[in-house]
Amino acid sequence: DIQMTQSPSSLSASVGDRVTITCRASQGISTWLAWYQQKPEKAPKALIYAASSVQSGVPSRFSGSGSGTDFTLTISSLQPEDFATYYCQQYNSHPLTFGGGTKVEIK
Amino acid sequence: QVQLQESGPGLVKPSETLSLTCTVSGGSISSYYWNWIRQPPGKGLEWIGNIYYRGNTNYNPSLKSRVTISLDTSKNQFSLKLSSVTAADTAVYYCARGEWHFDLWGRGTLVTVSS
């Protein structure tokens, strides 16, 4: 199985901050990576696929980059509704696997 | 718009079989891959497996011996059966759409394994 490691596991930030979350794959996955946002007691919401393609309806402040083993999710200017947990997911091969999550909290 | 809704018992006894159904509304199940994903309380996400509308399935090897995913196109539903459950199977179970990544999710349903 491909292991996905996210860092940090949590962070504190203020509204307006630029936030970067990192995801590392245990082996190369090209750009077969997706990002999700999950708020408490809610289902995950798709943000990014193919490492950098933004899902329809997702605000432009969200962006993704990377290829191979190292990927980043960036929120250019953190908004109050962005406080949530973020997960990466690889789809290079089965079984599909997720990172452990990064919780973005209010400073 | 297309919506997914999970349904099934919220409590299952140890060693029994967990059975859940996902109903697809606002669109046809006869395209796309359909997935089950779970999340133990306070933990991360685990992909269980998926099914294509033609019946092809893929399962997570860690659960494969206990999992069956099936589909009923006449009801626009797909289902999960997980046998021989233990407390470790306690989780919120989500259904989701997508072959490789998931663009649409159900709200999830909590299943607790307890006697």
Image (tube, coloured by chain):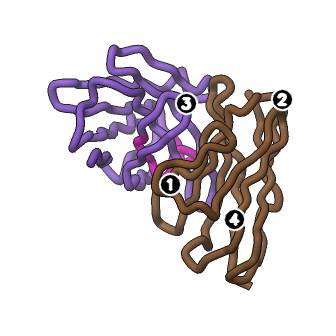
Chain colours: A brown, B purple
The amino acid pointed to by label 3 is Trp
Q: Which numbered dot is residue A28?
A: none
**Badge 4: residue crowd in 10 Å (few <14, some 14–19, many ≥20):** many
Q: Is the C-beta separation of discs 4 and 1 under 8 Å?
A: no
Say which chain tag 1 marks. Answer: A
Residue named by callout 3: B100
Residue A49 higher or lower than A8, as above or below: above
Q: Are marks 2 and 1 in contact (CB under 8 Å)?
A: no
Q: Which residue is mark 1?
A: A45
Q: Secondary structure at mark 3?
A: loop
- How far apart are labels 2 and 1 at the CA level? 25 Å
User: In what element is the residue under mark 2?
Assistant: loop
2 and 3 marks on the same chain: no
The residue most toward the left is B74
Q: Nearer the viewer, mark 3 or mark 4?
A: 4
The image quadrant of residue A19 is bottom right
> Horizontal and vertical percent for residue B45?
59, 47
- N-terminal label among 2 and 1: 2
The residue identified by callout 2 is A27
